[in-house]
Amino acid sequence: MFPIHHDASGAKFAMVGQIAGIPVIHDLNGRMSVTNAAEDVVRTVLLLCNGTQPPAIIYRDSRGIYDAMRIVNGRFYDFILTGADTDVEAFNRIADLLRKPRPHHVPAESHARR
């Protein structure tokens, strides 16, 4: 069993591993979903990564679908929707995007919430 983490907004998740340095988490249906609390979840996961700055976090949502949250300058930037059935499949779908130059940082608050 993996440790369960709660962030400031009430999202509940388990960090279940990493693929090539990309953290993988599972949404555990807290007060808020991982996607609705993306900024807080990213902050919490980065603290768990002990100073490393991964370019994304792969997450399994409450329906069992794997997508990713892109991180730019240590903050949530946007979602990368993969619709994958496994974490490895999600990683393979985002790998090309992660090799490209990072976009200029735009504060997450300016993005429309999904």
Image: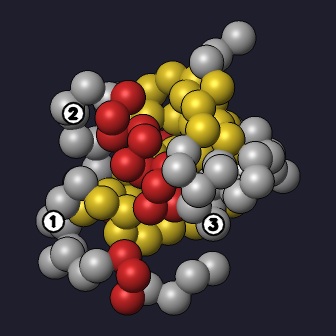
Q: Residue at x 37, y 76 (%)?
A: 108
Asked if residue 7 is positioned above or below residue 88 in the image, the reply reads: below
Q: How many marks?
A: 3
Q: Is residue 112 visible?
A: yes
Give the percent coordinates (x, y) of residue 63.
Answer: 84, 52
**Mark 2 touches mark 3? (CB < 8 Å):** no
**Does dot 3 land on a helix, a strand or a loop?**
loop
Q: Which residue, given by chain and number where applicable, does mark 2 sit on?
A: 52
Q: CA distance from mark 2 to mark 3?
A: 24 Å
Residue neighbourhood size for the residue with mark 1, other residues' Cα within 10 Å, grouped as few (<14), some (14–19), many (≥20): few
**Mark 2 touches mark 1? (CB < 8 Å):** no
Q: Quick one: label 2 or label 1, which is nearer the N terminus? A: 2
Q: Residue at x 71, y 58 (%)?
A: 32
Residue neighbourhood size for the residue with mark 2, other residues' Cα within 10 Å, grouped as few (<14), some (14–19), many (≥20): few
Q: Which residue, given by chain and number where applicable, does mark 1 sit on?
A: 101
What is the quadrant of residue 28 in the picture?
A: top right
The numbered disc on residue 36 is 3
Q: Nearer the viewer, mark 3 or mark 1?
A: 3
Question: Which amino acid is tagged 2?
Answer: Thr
